[in-house]
Amino acid sequence: MSDEVVRQDELELDGEEQAAEKQAAEKKPAGKKSAKPANKKKQGEKAVSRYLRELKSEFKKIIWPSRSSLVRNTVVTLIMCAIMGAIISLFDLGLGALINLLMSLK
C-alpha cells in the first residue's frame, strides 16, 4: 500500500514538473532556441523544493506514539539500561577479583 502511495506521489510530482516545462516551452518564441544550459541555481532550487515536498509527505505518514506509550517505553528503556549496567559492573568486579587472586598466587 505504501509503495503505491509513494509511486503515486512521484507520478504527481513528475506530472507537475512536465506541466511546468510545457508552459515554459509555450512561452518561448518558436524561432529562438536557448543556446545556454538551464540555470544551475534554478535546478538546485527545484531539487530543494522537491526534497521538501517529499519530506512533508513522509512526515504525514509517520505514526507518532501517544504520550502514555512514550513514557512507558522511556521507563522500560531506562530500567533496562540500569539492569545491564548492574550486570556489567558485577562481571567487572568478579573478573577484577579473579585477576587479583591469580596475581597474589605468585
Image (cartoon, rainbow, N blue to C red):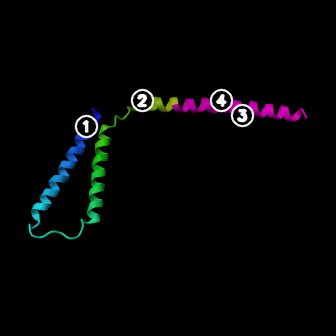
Query: Badge 2 is on which residue?
Result: 69
- Say whether marks 2 and 1 touch (CB < 8 Å): no
Residue 100 locus on image (x, y percent): 83, 34
| Mark pair 1, 3: CA separation | 52 Å
Badge 1 crowding class, 10 Å Cα cut-off, few under 14, some 14 to 19, many 20 or more, is few
Give the main secondary structure of the magenta stretch. Answer: helix
Which sits earlier in the primary sequence, circle 4 or circle 2? Answer: 2
Crowd rating for badge 4 (residues with CA inside 10 Å; few <14, some 14–19, many 20+): few
Q: Earlier in the sequence, mark 4 or mark 1?
A: 1
Say which amino acid is labelled 2: Ser
Residue at the spot 74% in from the left edge and 32% down from the top edge: 93
Q: CA distance from mark 4 to mark 1?
A: 46 Å
Residue at label 3? Answer: 92
* 85 falls in the magenta region: yes
**Vertical placement of residue 41 versus 18, above or below:** below
* Secondary structure found at label 4: helix
* Mark 4 or 2, closer to the camera: 4
Residue 87: assigned label: 4
Mark 2 falls on what kind of element? helix
Q: Which callout, 1 or 3, points to the residue nearer the camera?
A: 1
Marks 4, 1: nearer the viewer: 1
The image quadrant that residue 92 belongs to is: top right
